[in-house]
Image (cartoon, grey):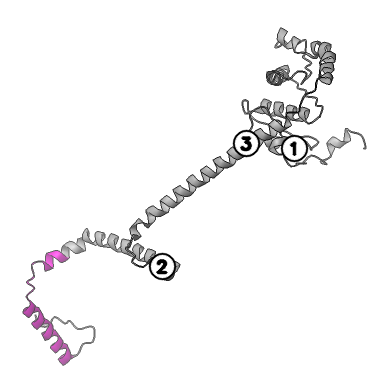
Amino acid sequence: MGTSLATWTQDDDLNVETSLPKEKELYFPFQYDKYQLRTLGLLGSKASIIEGPPGTGKSETISNILCHLAATHHRVLFVSQKAQALKVVKDKLKKLGVKYLFGYLPNPGSSQLGEEDEVDGIAPQLTGLGSHIDRLMQRTVDTPQSAIEQTVEKKEKLVAQLNRTIYLQRRYYSLHQELLRLTGFDLAITDISRFAKRFSESAWQEITNTLVEIALLEDGTEGYEACDEKREFDHVFLDFEWDAKIVTDAIGAIKDDIARTGYDRRSRVFRFH
């Protein structure tokens, strides 16, 4: 069972995920997001499946991976069951304008290919490859690595500034919302240092609980104002003449009666009627 075919029946090296390269070591010429970038860390696996509905960027992800591997001195064979999938990736790579970046082997029997695709094939490219290599060997070209690094560093600074700005905006919004909640506690403090020393979290909690109780009492008062018991009470007592001497004499009579006869909590006290 030591054949290469047998390795596909085993789970070894099917879940290998390596760290992603730094920005200055990344060669993704097409747009990408963090999820597409993660595919680069899966290249160490024996096999990986990347799936998604049409239009989610699978072709761009493949094109980015091919460019990155080519730029880091790797040779890649990209195959597809459908000729159209190869054509889409080929057209993307062609837009970069990098000569001999790829060798395209179209299916001559495919009805989806035209004359332009035949021109892009590997046969016409091979005819001029030798002279292109000679020119590269004779020409002294300064590596653009320093320019790339400067661009990456500038981008990183801009990203850091953007993240800082977003953080400050979120912090401002949070503080503004807290200020709105504290508006009801706007007090005239004459001695700020003394207030800062004596005011504590427990005092703040006590104030908050008191405000909650006040709100509950206000709700209860409003409910009492609208209930039938309140209306009945008003009907009975609003016409009562609250003469101080009459009320005082009545209370005195009740007090004397209780002192004289006793009160066992079951007797009626309105005997003065």
Q: Which residue is mark 3?
A: 154
Q: Which residue is mark 2?
A: 193
User: Which corner quadrant of the image does residue 76 belong to?
Assistant: top right
Three-letter amino acid code of the residue under disc 2: Ser
**Which element is circle 3 on?**
helix
Q: Which residue is mark 1?
A: 42
Q: Are marks 3 and 1 in contact (CB under 8 Å)?
A: no
Which label number is shown at residue 266?
A: none
Give the side of residue 251 with respect to residue 149, left or right.
left
Q: Indicate the position of residue 171 as horizontal and vertical percent values.
A: 48, 49
Q: Earlier in the sequence, mark 2 or mark 3?
A: 3
User: Which corner quadrant of the image does residue 248 belong to?
Assistant: bottom left
Between 5 and 201, which is closer to the camera in this rendering?
201
Question: Magenta segment range?
Answer: 233-261
Residue 181 can be seen, yes or no: yes
Q: Are marks 2 and 3 in contact (CB under 8 Å)?
A: no
Q: Are marks 2 and 1 in contact (CB under 8 Å)?
A: no
Q: Indicate the position of residue 153 as horizontal and vertical percent values.
A: 65, 37
User: Which corner quadrant of the image does residue 94 belong to?
Assistant: top right
Three-letter amino acid code of the residue under disc 3: Lys
Q: Quadrant of the C terminus?
A: bottom left
Q: Residues within 10 Å of mark 1 (few under 14, many from 20)?
A: some
Q: Residues within 10 Å of mark 3 (few under 14, many from 20)?
A: few
What residue do we see at 40% from left, 70% from top?
194
Nearer the camera: disc 2 or disc 1: 2
- Vertical placement of residue 87 versus 144, above or below: above
